[in-house]
């Protein structure tokens, strides 16, 4: 895996000149937005003062809000079109180059992602999303292992009606973060799901009872002998023997270390000789800044750290060691 020192050298030699070029484009966008805001404020004040001179508060209020609405529409049209073009260019030239720097076998498609069928096939999240967004797709071989991942934000909706009969739609996040699919280093059939142990952590002994009832999932609750692993995770599977074949003492220890070092909520499933890993992150991971400079090594280091998770997963789970060979 690449080191931070190598990243620093790559940043200075290759990325920084491109970032500085893109900074000129970013500044033009912010300047256009500033001009739009100043122009809008001028006309709003002009309309307000003019109507007050004619002593007509109705015209003053109407003019003020009409200009405000028009200005906001123009603002959002401009910011959407300009920032979309800038973001696409930034990802192609900067994020794409970081992906190649990490491993030349990896490819990056900023507007693609892991599709909803593959996401649902993992059986990690059982709620079918009403809104599904995926982007920043990376795929390729690292060593012996093919891996693919992208950002995903899945949501479901609920509707409520107030006392006046007005209906409102509310959106709730199912999952937001990075979603990985990789070849596993053992052949197996069936499904084993490893989830954060929220019930036992929250409710203690009662949580254990809730887990054993397993009201939402097919398969059985599988208890394993590693106490540290059991503190962090709960395991469900359709076959006890297969689950133990996959979750060896060594793999459980590596998962505990990976979860502890990462300090993010993680979900896994093992299905049909593949491993699915979902890592919760509550923000967009590869978007450039618009109102602040991107000429910042810490920002590039953050992109690098998130992109290197693919290599870390392969390394931590020892996926390049092929058991069947």
Image (cartoon, rainbow, N blue to C red):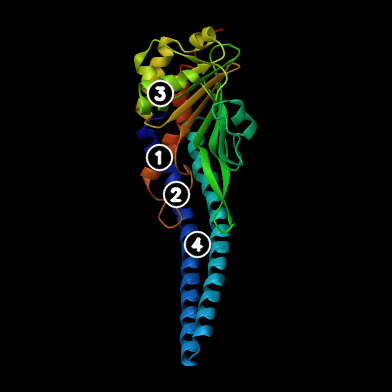
- Label 4: which residue? 29
Whichever of callouts 4 and 3 sits on the residue coming sooner in the sequence is 4
Single out the mark in the foreground, 3 or 1.
3
Examine the image and state in which quarter residue 108 appears: top right
Instruction: Determine crowd level at label 2: few under 14, some 14-19, many 20+ residues with C-alpha closer than 10 A.
Output: few
Are the residues flagged by discs 1 and 4 in contact, CB closer than 8 Å? no
Secondary structure under the numbered disc 2 in the rendered image? helix
Q: CA distance from mark 4 to mark 2?
A: 19 Å
Single out the mark in the foreground, 3 or 2.
3
Q: CA distance from mark 3 to mark 1?
A: 36 Å
147 relative to 11 in the view: left or right: right
Q: From what the image shows, is residue 282 above or below residue 245?
A: below
Single out the mark in the foreground, 4 or 2.
4
Q: Residue at x 47, y 83 (%)?
A: 48
The percent coordinates of residue 91 (x first, y second) are: 52, 45
The percent coordinates of residue 66 (x first, y second) are: 55, 75
Secondary structure under the numbered disc 1 in the rendered image? helix
Whichever of callouts 2 and 1 sits on the residue coming sooner in the sequence is 2
- Judging depth in this view, the residue of 56 and 72 nearest the camera is 56
186 relative to 20 in the view: left or right: right
- Label 1: which residue? 302
The percent coordinates of residue 55 (x first, y second) are: 48, 91
Q: Residue at x 41, y 10 (%)?
A: 249
Q: Quadrant of the N terminus?
A: top left
Secondary structure under the numbered disc 3 in the rendered image? helix
Residue 1 in view: no
Instruction: Determine crowd level at label 4: few under 14, some 14-19, many 20+ residues with C-alpha closer than 10 A.
Output: some
Single out the mark in the foreground, 2 or 1.
1
- Label 3: which residue? 207
Q: Quadrant of the C terminus?
A: top right
């Amino acid at each position: 895996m690449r080191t931070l020192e190598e990243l620093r050298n790559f940043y200075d030699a290759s990325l920084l000149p491109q970032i500085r070029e893109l900074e000129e484009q970013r500044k033009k966008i912010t300047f256009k937005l500033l001009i739009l805001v100043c122009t809008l404020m001028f006309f709003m004040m002009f309309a307000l003062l003019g109507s007050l001179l004619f002593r007509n508060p109705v015209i003053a209020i109407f003019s003020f809000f009409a200009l405000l609405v028009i200005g906001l529409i123009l603002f959002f049209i401009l910011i959407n079109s300009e920032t979309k073009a800038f973001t696409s260019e930034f990802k192609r030239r900067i994020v794409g180059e970081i992906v190649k720097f990490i491993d030349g076998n990896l490819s990056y498609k900023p507007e693609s992602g892991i599709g909803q069928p593959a996401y649902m096939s993992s059986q990690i999240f059982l709620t079918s999303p009403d809104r599904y967004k995926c982007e920043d797709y990376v795929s390729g071989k690292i060593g012996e292992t093919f891996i693919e991942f992208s950002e995903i934000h899945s949501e479901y909706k609920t509707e409520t009606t107030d006392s006046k009969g007005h209906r409102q739609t509310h959106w709730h996040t199912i999952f937001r973060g990075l979603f990985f699919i990789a070849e596993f280093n053992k052949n197996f059939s069936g499904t084993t799901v490893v989830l954060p142990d929220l019930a036992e952590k929250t409710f203690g002994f009662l949580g254990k009872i809730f887990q054993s009832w397993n009201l939402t999932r097919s398969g059985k609750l599988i208890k394993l002998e590693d106490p540290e692993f059991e503190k962090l995770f709960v395991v469900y599977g359709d076959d006890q023997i297969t689950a133990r074949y996959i979750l060896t003492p060594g793999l459980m220890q590596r998962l505990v270390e990976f979860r502890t070092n990462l300090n993010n909520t993680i979900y896994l499933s093992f299905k049909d000789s593949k491993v699915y890993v979902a890592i919760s992150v509550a923000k967009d991971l590869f978007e450039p800044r618009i109102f602040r400079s991107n000429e910042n090594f810490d920002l590039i280091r953050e992109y690098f750290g998130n992109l290197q998770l693919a290599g870390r997963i392969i390394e931590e789970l020892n996926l390049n060691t092929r058991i069947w060979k």
